[in-house]
Image (cartoon, rainbow, N blue to C red):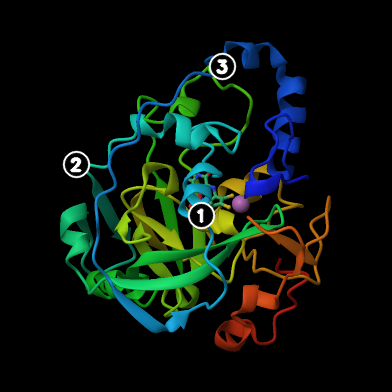
């Protein structure tokens, strides 16, 4: 894929995630695509709401930060459409209040938390992580949140809990691409579902995220609450979460259902294991021209390699 100055992609380009979806759409009958809403002007974005957080110097990538403009206008959020510019254009339909997050499954104290209760659950930290998309681009973003572990400890996982499943909201009124017959391009199943092993979910790097760049999370970045797992490909970092469920079996995830040969459960950033359709050895930092080498575990190998001791990471991709 080609990237223009400023980091944007030409809108005519099809990016790797969606090549498969497009092919699928043709097979299903591409007529449905013609029903997609016409391109229109985005509604004026709501004024950013400031959000205070304490910088955590232990989690502070020193690389140049990706401009906020790119962070909010070059997004993958398939609930709004296939293209990188769809989320910014359409995200005004998402209503981040009122919002509740159900935390249940194999826990002693299942609970549905109001989002404002979650915001007060633990001190908010600012952490600068890079997010490495499976499409071989990356961004450096000052996120705001707190370790997912703080929330999980509240509900007290039982001894049977081995995995954590994440669900994004399903509401076609808020997410236009969930409307049947409108964006009938894909076989993506809603809710967008992701998962982690419990030890990954409890790892201090795993950030329950409510803001970025000193402000409340913009809708297109997964308001009001999402997960960020910096050593895994970006698609693991599910947005706009309404449910976190503890299970004893490995969750079926959206992308591994869609294309199991391309997207595994673990999805650790691994420059040595190519995606079947492209190399993962290098990446394009949005806003830069020269490609850079992709680092094992996206640069977090020292912190997370031990989670995978004894595992063949070619098999468990
Ligand atoms: N619910 C949901 N979460 C999602 C996605 C999505 O389409 N739907 N896209 C993922 C992908 S592929 C990436 S790279 C990141 C992008 O996060 P950002 O837009 O905040 O940079 O979100 C991930 N989370
Ligand atoms: Mo991605």
**Does the residue tagged 3 have its C-beta within 8 Å of any atom of ligand 1?**
no
Rounded to the nearest angstrom, the CA distance separating label 2 from label 3 is: 29 Å
Q: Is mark 1 within 8 Å of ligand 1?
A: yes
| In this view, 308 is above or below 242 | below
Towards the viewer: 84 or 201: 84
Q: Tell me where residue 317 sits by quadrant.
A: bottom right
Front position among marks 1 and 3? 3
For the point 70% across and 80% down, the residue is 311
Q: Earlier in the sequence, mark 2 or mark 3?
A: 3
Q: Is residue 85 above or below residue 245?
A: above
Residue 108 point in image, percent of width and height: 24, 70
**Is 225 displayed left or right of 69 in the figure?**
left
- Mark 3 nearby-residue class (10 Å; few <14, some 14–19, many ≥20): some
Q: Which residue is mark 1?
A: 194
Q: Which residue is mark 2?
A: 98
Whether residue 65 is situated above or below residue 50 in the rendered picture: below
Residue 162 appears in the rendering = no
Q: Residues within 10 Å of mark 2 (few under 14, many from 20)?
A: few
How dense is the environment of label 1, judged by Cα within 10 Å: few (below 14), some, or many (20 and up)? many
Mark 1 vs 2, N-terminal side:
2
Image point 64% across, 17% down: which residue? 33
C-alpha separation, residue under disc 1 versus residue under disc 2: 23 Å
Total marks drawn? 3
Disc 3, SS: loop
Q: Quadrant of residue 24?
A: top right
Q: Are marks 2 and 3 in contact (CB under 8 Å)?
A: no
Which residue is labeled 3 in the image? 36
Q: CA distance from mark 1 to mark 3?
A: 27 Å
């Amino acid at each position: 894929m080609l990237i223009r100055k400023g980091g944007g992609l030409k809108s005519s380009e099809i990016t790797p995630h969606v090549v498969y979806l497009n092919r699928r759409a043709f097979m299903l009958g591409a007529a449905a695509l013609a029903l997609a809403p016409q391109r229109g002007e985005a509604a004026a974005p709501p004024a950013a709401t400031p959000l205070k957080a304490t910088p955590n110097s232990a989690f502070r990538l020193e690389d140049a930060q990706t401009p906020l403009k790119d962070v909010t206008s070059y997004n993958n959020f398939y609930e709004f459409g296939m293209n990188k510019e769809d989320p910014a254009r359409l995200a005004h339909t998402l209503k981040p209040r009122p919002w509740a997050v159900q935390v249940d499954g194999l826990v002693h104290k299942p609970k549905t938390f109001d989002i404002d209760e979650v915001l007060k659950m633990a001190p908010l930290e600012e952490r600068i992580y890079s997010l490495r998309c499976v499409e071989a681009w990356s961004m450096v973003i000052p996120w705001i949140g707190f370790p997912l572990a703080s929330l999980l400890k509240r509900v007290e996982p039982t001894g049977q809990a081995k995995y954590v499943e994440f669900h994004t909201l399903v509401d076609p009124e808020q997410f236009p691409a969930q409307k049947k017959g409108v964006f009938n391009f894909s076989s993506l199943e809603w809710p967008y579902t992701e998962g982690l092993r419990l030890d990954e979910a409890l790892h201090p790097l795993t950030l329950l995220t409510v803001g970025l760049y000193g402000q409340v999370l913009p809708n297109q970045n997964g308001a009001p609450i999402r997960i960020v797992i910096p050593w895994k490909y970006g698609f693991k970092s599910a947005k706009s979460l309404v449910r976190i469920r503890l299970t004893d079996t490995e969750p079926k995830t959206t992308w591994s259902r869609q294309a199991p040969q391309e997207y595994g459960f673990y999805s650790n950033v691994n420059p040595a294991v190519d995606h079947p359709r492209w190399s993962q050895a290098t990446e394009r930092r949005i806003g830069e021209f020269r490609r850079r080498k992709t680092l094992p575990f996206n640069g977090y190998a020292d912190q997370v390699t031990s989670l995978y001791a004894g595992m063949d990471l070619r098999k468990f991709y």
